[in-house]
């Protein structure tokens, strides 16, 4: 499976406890389940997970694609480390909870409601399913350009997908 490219997506969930930091991580398993009649997405999380705890608590999460390698690496930090707290403080938008701050290389976002009855534990992971409630490009918020290519992960490295192949 190392050779198969996987999209990298930042998942952020707001803790509902007053004064709590949001929780977030980088996943390589983000997937569209269906678009019609109701749009659903899914991704996998290893348990235990503070982000999954925040998703269960708030019942919502935001998914964002990024073109920024450093941002992706920042969301891989140990969740108990001070550097992770700094990652959240410097990258997550206060005005739009769950979204990334301007200028961070984010491309698109999806605000989702956690669908508990469709989510499924599998071994030491959980398949999280969300219903997409709203979505957009960060470029519409004055952030990045949606023509940037999102990061993918393949053969142990971060990459950008290449241009489309000719249909000939």
Image (tube, grey):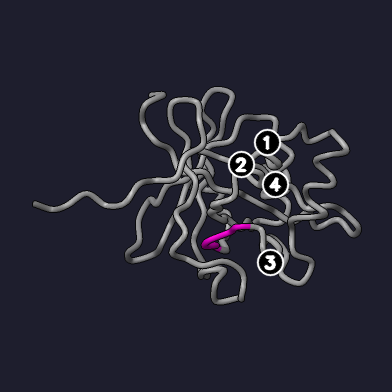
Q: Which residue is mark 3?
A: 102
**2 or 3: mark nearer the eye:** 3
Mark 3 falls on what kind of element?
Answer: loop
Dot label at residue 26: 2
Q: Are marks 1 and 3 in contact (CB under 8 Å)?
A: no
Furthest-left residue in this view: 168
Mark 4 falls on what kind of element?
Answer: strand
Q: Are marks 1 and 2 in contact (CB under 8 Å)?
A: yes
Question: Is residue 160 shown above or below 147?
Answer: above
> Between 125 and 66, which is closer to the camera in this rendering?
66
Mark 1 falls on what kind of element?
Answer: loop
Decide if residue 49 is on the left or right side of residue 144: right
Q: Which residue is located at x 57 percent, y 64 percent?
A: 111
Q: Which residue is located at x 54 percent, y 23 percent?
A: 123
Q: Which residues are magenta?
A: 105-110
Q: What percent of the width, then of the height, locates residue 165?
A: 22, 49
N-term mark: 4 or 1: 4
Q: Residues within 10 Å of mark 1 (few under 14, many from 20)?
A: some
Question: Is residue 145 shown above or below 119?
Answer: below
Q: What percent of the width, then of the height, locates residue 73?
A: 66, 38
Dot label at residue 76: 1
Mark 2 falls on what kind of element?
Answer: strand
Furthest-right residue in this view: 19
N-term mark: 4 or 3: 4
Assign the magenta stretch its main secondary structure: strand
Q: Which residue is mark 4?
A: 24
Using the numbered discs, state the Cα–Cα distance from disc 2 to disc 3 in whole angstroms: 18 Å
């Amino acid at each position: 499976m190392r050779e198969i490219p996987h999209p990298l997506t930042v998942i952020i969930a707001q803790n509902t406890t007053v004064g709590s930091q949001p929780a977030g991580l980088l996943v390589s398993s983000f997937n569209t389940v269906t678009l019609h009649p109701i749009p659903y997405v899914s991704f996998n999380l290893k348990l235990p997970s503070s982000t999954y705890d925040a998703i269960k608590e708030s019942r919502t999460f935001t998914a964002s694609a990024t073109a920024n390698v450093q941002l992706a690496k920042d969301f891989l930090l140990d969740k108990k480390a001070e550097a992770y707290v700094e990652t959240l403080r410097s990258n997550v938008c206060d005005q739009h909870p769950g979204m990334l701050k301007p200028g961070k290389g984010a491309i698109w976002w999806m605000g989702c409601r956690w669908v508990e009855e469709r989510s499924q534990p599998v071994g030491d992971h959980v398949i999280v399913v969300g219903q997409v409630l709203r979505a957009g490009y960060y470029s519409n918020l004055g952030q990045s350009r949606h023509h940037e290519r999102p990061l993918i992960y393949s053969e142990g490295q971060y990459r950008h997908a290449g241009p489309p192949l000719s249909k000939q």
